[in-house]
Structure formats: structure tokens, C-alpha cells
């Protein structure tokens, strides 16, 4: 294999694929990136056996071939080369890959490409195309609520499925049992029969990072065990979580009738300020509601206390309810409108939080006893 490629093009592709690679591997070849040069294209592929990223970039292929080399080492070398450099890859000997650029030259250990695992695709399934911006919003508005508890593995991801509510939509849901985030996007043509699938946490993070550099559209293919996203010159494949996502609609309250509207920015900043003295473990803050007034209160015997008042739109009975301040802040950061709405029932029942300017987003938060 003899390949010449422009440094910035190579670096961008390496940046995309190398992040999949686990830094500590018991299987040496999983630390490597597969390089395959043929025609006028260099393909780069990396996998951790659960997710796989493959990207094609233009290159001058003098001699076709394929080999694997340590992904992190290659990335660090190319990153440190000067801008505009032409990177030459030459598989001259049986056990080393020669990399040269200008006066720099490296000899890198390799492993045979035939030993590199492939996350094979499954032809049967649902295929559709959707705007990248829609996928970006589905991820951004929900991923913060994914569970970190490995014992509840079926919550360690974002649940994607088609729903016929409100004329049909593609819905993303995430929950950790304490909070729930739900967002609807337009239902793409061909996605009507999409089954409910759970995209793992790591795959969600990698997909969001890749979308940042993507074009306007993304192709999605969903099978029983895998999901594949294709955009630009990148193919991203992930195994799905093999489990049943809970019936999330059961935890969305239907009878809440106490409504409070508050300025989003004022609310976020006030919660952030008073939570400074809250206990690290619970991060609890009490919301005391009176007519057109909200008082945020924190009492921590070890650190002290804090309270702050806000003017709100609230006409119902006085009540007090406690929440985890960090959870409130996570939701507030996703509110795009100037106002957010809390739809409450009582101190022990879940509360709905809505964005007044995005009716497709819904958040549910369980209260704390304070």
C-alpha cells in the first residue's frame, strides 16, 4: 500500500474514527484503525465491537492495499505535523508502516487487516432519510436524562420510535427514573413502521459529535439488532441495547392542574445561585409558591442556607415542593423560549416542565422530600 493524503483531510477523518477506540483493550487489534486504499479513496474504520465508524476521504493511491495501525498513535502524529503537509503512507515491509511528511519519518507497528473485526450490516429493516438538525435536536433535548446506572442497562440510552400521536412523529425519550425527557420531530417518510429501539449512551455521544460536521440530511437504517447512520462520507453503525424500554407514558402525569410560568433565564440563574450551599448528595432546593411569587430555599446545616424570590405567573393555591437543583438546571438549559412552565399537582407527585416556545418538548421531574 502506498498512499499520499493531505494532512488536514487525514486529521479530520482520524479525529472522527479514533474516538471510538477504547484506550484499554484486551484485544490488541481493537486499538487500531483499519486503513484501506483503493482507487482514489482512503477508507478509515475503527470499532469497539459495539459501534463502528467508517469514513472515506480522497487520496492519491499509488498502490492499493490495507493494514491496521494504532489509532491514537497515528492521530497524535498527524495532529503534530505542520499544516498543509502531504502525508505519505508506505507499507514497505511486512511488520512496519512507514509514515513520512517533509523531513519527519515514522515507522509504526502494524497488525494484518484480515484480523480486523467487522460490524456486519443487516439488510432487513426500516430505512429513511431525515434532516440532520432534527436528529441533533432529538439527541440534545433528551440525552442528559439517560441513566448512568449499569444495573438498569435498558435505561442507558435514548429510546427512538415512531408514534402516530399528533399526526405522526419520530420520538426520542430518555429517563433515569428521576427525570424524563421527551422530544418529537417530524416523521420521515418510510419511518412509519420503525420499531422502538434503544441507542446506547456511547453511540448517542459519538453520533452527536459526527453530526456537527454533517450535511443537511442523514440516512437511517434500523434492523432488529443494529442502527446505521450514513451522512457525507461517514457510515456509523451501532448495536442496539437488547432490552425493553419501560412504558414511559405511565409516568407522565395527566391530572396536574397548578400552573406556574417563570422567566427561563431568571429561574436558571436563581436555582444555580441558591444551590451553591446545597448538600452535594441531594442538591435539594425547595420551591415555595404563592400568588405570583416563587421563593427558592436551600437549608444545609453544614454549609448554610440561601433563599431568593422571583416574580412568576401563578394563580393557584400555595404549595411547597422540592427538586434536585442539578436536574432543574439540566432541563432549564434545554429550554429555548423566554418562559418555561411548571405544571404541578402536589409535593409528592411528578411535575411536568414545558418550553413555551417548543410544544414538541416535554420534561417530567420527580420531587424530593425537603
Image: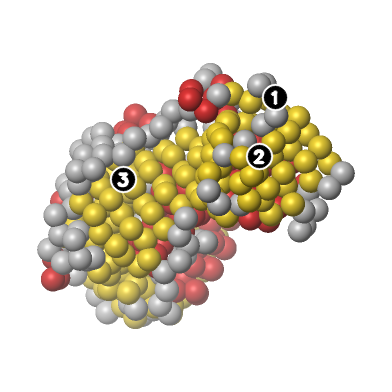
Foreground label between 2 and 3 = 2
Left or right placement of residue 10 versus residue 348 in this view: right
Left or right placement of residue 362 versus residue 27 in this view: left
Left or right placement of residue 85 versus residue 257 in this view: right
User: Which residue corresponds to mark 3?
Assistant: 227
The residue at the far top in this view is 26
Of residues 25 and 155, the one nearer the viewer is: 25
The N terminus sits in image quarter: top right
Q: Is residue 309 depicted above or below 109 in this figure?
A: below
Q: Residues within 10 Å of mark 3 (few under 14, many from 20)?
A: many
In x, y percent, where is residue 3? 65, 44
Q: CA distance from mark 1 to mark 3?
A: 38 Å
Of residues 87 and 272, the one nearer the viewer is: 87
In x, y percent, where is residue 176? 34, 44
Q: CA distance from mark 2 to mark 3?
A: 34 Å
Of residues 168 and 217, the one nearer the viewer is: 217
Q: Earlier in the sequence, mark 1 or mark 2?
A: 2
Q: Residues within 10 Å of mark 1 (few under 14, many from 20)?
A: few
Identified at 15% across, 59% down, the residue is 192
User: Which residue corresponds to mark 2?
Assistant: 2
Identified at 57% across, 63% down, the residue is 273
Label 1 sits on a secondary structure element that is loop
Q: Earlier in the sequence, mark 1 or mark 3?
A: 1
Label 3 sits on a secondary structure element that is strand
Q: Is residue 40 depicted above or below 93 in this figure?
A: below
Identified at 81% across, 37% down, the residue is 105
Q: Earlier in the sequence, mark 2 or mark 3?
A: 2
Of residues 306 and 103, the one nearer the viewer is: 103
User: Which residue corresponds to mark 1?
Assistant: 93
In x, y percent, where is residue 316? 24, 75
| Residue contact at pointers 1 and 3, CB within 8 angstroms | no
Amino acid at each position: 500500500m502506498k498512499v499520499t493524503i493531505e494532512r488536514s483531510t487525514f486529521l479530520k477523518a482520524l479525529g472522527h474514527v479514533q474516538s471510538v477506540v477504547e484506550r484499554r483493550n484486551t484485544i490488541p487489534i481493537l486499538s487500531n484503525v483499519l486503513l484501506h486504499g483503493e482507487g482514489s479513496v482512503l477508507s478509515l474504520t475503527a470499532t469497539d465491537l459495539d459501534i463502528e465508524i467508517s469514513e472515506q476521504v480522497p487520496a492519491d493511491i499509488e498502490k492499493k492495499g490495507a493494514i491496521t495501525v494504532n489509532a491514537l498513535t497515528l492521530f497524535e502524529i498527524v495532529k503534530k505535523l505542520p499544516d498543509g503537509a502531504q502525508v505519505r503512507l508506505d507499507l514497505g515491509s511486512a511488520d512496519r508502516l512507514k509514515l513520512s511528511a517533509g523531513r519527519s519519518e515514522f515507522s509504526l507497528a502494524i497488525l494484518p487487516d484480515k484480523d480486523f473485526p467487522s460490524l456486519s450490516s443487516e439488510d432487513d429493516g426500516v430505512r429513511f432519510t431525515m434532516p440532520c438538525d432534527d436528529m441533533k435536536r432529538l439527541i440534545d433535548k433528551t440525552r442528559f436524562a439517560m441513566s448512568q446506572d449499569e444495573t438498569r442497562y435498558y435505561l442507558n440510552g435514548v429510546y427512538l420510535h415512531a408514534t402516530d400521536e399528533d399526526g405522526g412523529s419520530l420520538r426520542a425519550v430518555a429517563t433515569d427514573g428521576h427525570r424524563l425527557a421527551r422530544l418529537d420531530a417530524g416523521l420521515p417518510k418510510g419511518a412509519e413502521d420503525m420499531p422502538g429501539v434503544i441507542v446506547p449512551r456511547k453511540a448517542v455521544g459519538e453520533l452527536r459529535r459526527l453530526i456537527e460536521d454533517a450535511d443537511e440530511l442523514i440516512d437511517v437504517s434500523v434492523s432488529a439488532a443494529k442502527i446505521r447512520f450514513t451522512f457525507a462520507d461517514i457510515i456509523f453503525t451501532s448495536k442496539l441495547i437488547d432490552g425493553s424500554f419501560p412504558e414511559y407514558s405511565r409516568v407522565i402525569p395527566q391530572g396536574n392542574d397548578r400552573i406556574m410560568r417563570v422567566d427561563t433565564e431568571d429561574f436558571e440563574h436563581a436555582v444555580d445561585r441558591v444551590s451553591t450551599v446545597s448538600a452535594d448528595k441531594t442538591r435539594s432546593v425547595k420551591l415555595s409558591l404563592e400568588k405570583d411569587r416563587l421563593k427558592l430555599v436551600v437549608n444545609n446545616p453544614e454549609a448554610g442556607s440561601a433563599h431568593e424570590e422571583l416574580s412568576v405567573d401563578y394563580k393557584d393555591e400555595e404549595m411547597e415542593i422540592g427538586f434536585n437543583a442539578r436536574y432543574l438546571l439540566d432541563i432549564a438549559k434545554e429550554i429555548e423560549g423566554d418562559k418555561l412552565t411548571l405544571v404541578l399537582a402536589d409535593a409528592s407527585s411528578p411535575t411536568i416542565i414545558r418550553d413555551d416556545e417548543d410544544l414538541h418538548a416535554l420534561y417530567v421531574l420527580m420531587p424530593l422530600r425537603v
